[in-house]
Amino acid sequence: MKTLLPILLIVAGCFALAGCDESGGGGGFVPTGNILAVAAIPGSNVTIEVGGLVGSVPPGSTIEVTNLESGETETSFGQGDESFPPVTFTGNTGDEFNVVVIDDGSIVEDIVIGVTLLSDSVEQNLAQLGSVPNTIKIRGNRAYVPNGFSDNIQIFDLNQNPPSQVGTIVVPPGSNPYDITFLDDTRAYVPNYSSQSLAIVNVQTRVCEVLIVGTGHSGPIQPCLAVQTIAGNPFEEPAGIAIADGKAFVSNNNLNETFNPAGNGFITVLNTTNNLLVTIINSSGANTGDMEVIGGLLYAVNSGGTLFDPVTFEFSCDANFPPSIDLINTQTNSVVDTIDIPLSAQNPLVCLPNSMAVTDDGFGYLGLGVVGALLKVDLISGDVINGTGNPIVITDTTGLNFTADVAIRGNLLFTTLFNSDQIAVLNTNNDQLDPFPYMAPFPAGIRAFDPNAQLFDGVQSLAIRPGIPGVDFQGPDIFFTTGISEQLGSVDTTLGLE
């Protein structure tokens, strides 16, 4: 993920903000100033990491870091990419650190830096959302939030600081709009989870133009301008939508009245030209939800099921409905393969994969609906790299803290932690959690500052703004929603280095 701006090396005489070694120490190395001391939140006796980003020090150099308050000194060494691994201190976020870079016996940089707080890059409560915000999607400079119980989609202008609401699209009462996917710059599809329908909305005029329903639909149509009926029951808890090959693929959870699987899920396929039914694809597993299109294949996540004990108030994985991923040929509309994800007896809460994000080299990372962990699947080979028996642990595999959403840019994955009100970062090159300078999850709600708080915000969905921060836009590059407090928030992952 391009969270930090590309470093511009200017070779025009000798130029550097942090000084210049005229003797050419470090093989002509030019300091960039990207040496940071970082802590998560303000306070005393907190963990502080001091490290160097790519391009900050000469390879093989020695870096001596001293806490000027305590006098403690730690040493690190320059790497081949001109970074240096962070050293760790326990101190006060008001402390200052002296960083001395020595290369070939010469001091090439000698600076004093303060502590950068991850919390300073997070803005909470930017805007009040509607009731039960289900997701957030960004297209261009606009963010779209479908609010389930408010039966609308809020539209925010991200070029304003804070983002300003510039419009609302209303769907029929009782719809529960669950997702939004764009056909083009004008029209978008919105699956309505509760009313078993699909709305086609105009994001320019902010009007619901067409409501697509089955013959058994008896709910309201207005304010949609027209209705189109498909024979039978084409939708059963429609949860997601993907566009490919001139078709709209609508995933259906297919749940019963207790919100447990009524059988396997399915995918409804519509022609985007006339919105007529093309076919129904039966999924290999239950609770079909998130989908990603890669090349000519649609990867559909079958989340499976969980059990809830009303006496103990405990969750467990439902062995009758294990998760899987279906591979669907978008031209033939057929399931060509399935990646099974077996459940693990040793991790009885590691299940219910929901949101999936995919790296450029074809690895799918899946958030989980119960605990703070991720699954990893090689979508090309079909191998489950980190399954339920060996998940990538973000917090733990026993407590409720589900990774509600995941998003990837470059080599960085961002995942929300619903119960602890945080956004964690993972380096997908090596699956390292908390890669420097993101030495801890971003604090994005009440419990991030007070883990024992009874109240929490419920950091739920997130979306990454397209483009390069500081070049294509100014300000934060991640926007998130909270499911409990129903607020819009943001994160500037550049930490102010743009």
Image (cartoon, rainbow, N blue to C red):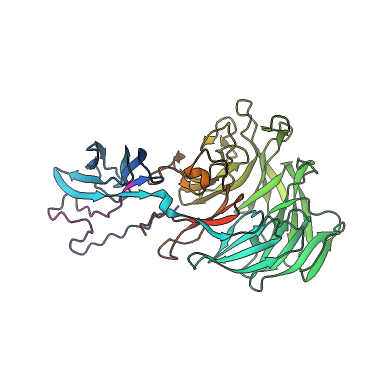
Q: Is residue 100 left or right of residue 138?
A: left
Q: Nearer the viewer, residue 190 or 300?
A: 190
Magenta-highlighted residues? 15-37
- Residue 317: x and y in percent read 68, 33
Question: Is residue 23 found inside the magenta-colored segment of the image?
Answer: yes
Quadrant position of residue 186: bottom right
Examine the residues drawn in magenta and state their main secondary structure. Answer: loop
In the figure, residue 247 lies in which quadrant? bottom right
- Looking at this view, name the residue that lies furthest to the front: 454
Expressed as whole percent of the image width and height from the top left, the position of residue 477 reads 47, 58
Q: Position of residue 58 (x, y in %)?
A: 24, 47
Residue 392, above or below 266? above
User: Is residue 48 found left or right of 421 in the rendered image?
Assistant: left
Q: Residue furthest top?
A: 346
Judging depth in this view, the residue of 238 and 68 nearest the camera is: 68
Q: Tell me: 346 left or right of 259.
A: left
Q: Is residue 421 magenta?
A: no
Above or below, 244 against 309 in this view is below
Total numbered circles:
0
Residue positioned 73% across, 41% down in the render: 286
**Residue lying at 23% horizontally and 37% vertically, measured from the top left:** 73
* 133 vs 66: above or below: below
Q: Is residue 360 visible?
A: yes
Q: Quadrant of the C terminus?
A: bottom left
> Residue at image x 43%, y 61%?
468
Q: Nearer the viewer, residue 68 or 289?
A: 68
Q: Position of residue 380 (x, y in %)?
A: 57, 44
Does residue 2 appear in this view?
no
